[in-house]
Image (cartoon, grey):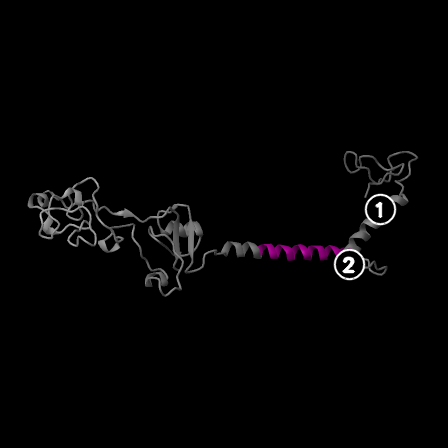
Amino acid sequence: MHRINSVNARQNQNGIDKAGFHDNADLAGQDATYLTPIWCNTVQEEIANVIEGFGDTLDLQNNAQLLGTLNKIVGKITELKNQVDGLESDLANYQDTAIGDLYITTKHFENADAVAIHKGYGTWTKFGNGHALMTQSNDETDPNWMQNLKSTGGENSTRIASAHLPAHNHIDEGSAYNKLVAAMKDITAVDGDGGGEIRPVADATNVGDNRSYIQVSDISVSQFEEMQIKTVGENQAFSLMQKSIVIAAWLRES
């Protein structure tokens, strides 16, 4: 597209550097602005391109085709506006957390009302209260609480009972005497066969020899009194907490 540029087009007719048409009556001997074939063809094709661009065929008998095309454009704009308005309405009413779902966040809220204001909808209840979230189990061998939604279980710490200990022996390597175990070399006594001597080697010919254990009769009273039952442990609870990160969870009730 271009403005008329014939030899007698009026310069600045429509503004600075915007030439236009004029009857040039104010100029002695000057004809009105000439039309040029180039300008007329330009205007023609600009209009025709609009009409054909919207799928219509140029009609010699229809002098309102451009108006019809413009009306189509307006209709399309109106249709798009209605779609945008509908999307805006949907967004304004959009609720990304359904009733019964959790809203998980790292934002701190003082109470449920603050959550409702932030989300713009819903009634909320703080959920979890320090419990780690666990997926529901379908394994019947798991505890019953693990199979039921919203059930809770577990503890932050626990104390073990003797039933939880592995089978073991108490040996105090630093003491010569211990009521639970003692070395033969630490006991001055007979071997339980009624003799006063201790034979160092047990074999098939010396049936009474026995260095594999100490009989009560082989321990003197003074030695027994020196023996101690060792007590260890402080009965302190230990943590069961896995490495965790704290978040806030709110349950939408309604």
Q: Element type at marker 2?
A: loop
Residue 68 among magenta residues: yes
Label count reads 2
Based on the displayed image, in which of its 4 quarters is residue 88 positioned?
bottom right
Q: CA distance from mark 1 to mark 2?
A: 20 Å
Residue found at x 34% / y 52%: 131
- What crowding class fits label 2: few (fewer than 14 Cα within 10 Å), some (14-19), or many (20 or more)? few
Residue located beneath label 2 in the image: 55
For residue 232, which numbered disc appears in the image?
none
Instruction: Indicate whether 96 appears above or below 175.
Output: below
Q: Which mark is residue 42?
A: 1
Which residue is at a point 82% across and 58% down the rendered structure image? 63
**Residue 92 % position (x, y):** 51, 54
Nearer to us in this view, 94 or 18: 94
For numbered disc 1, what is the local secondary structure? helix
Q: Earlier in the sequence, mark 1 or mark 2?
A: 1
Q: Relative to the observer, which residue lies in front, 58 or 167? A: 167
Q: In the image, what residue type sits under mark 2? A: Gly
Q: Nearer the viewer, residue 243 or 161?
A: 161
Q: Give the residue at the far left of this rendering.
A: 221
Q: Position of residue 154 (x, y in %)?
A: 31, 55
Residues drawn in magenta: 64-85
Relative horizontal placement of residue 228, taking residue 72 as reference (left or right): left
Quadrant containing the N terminus is top right
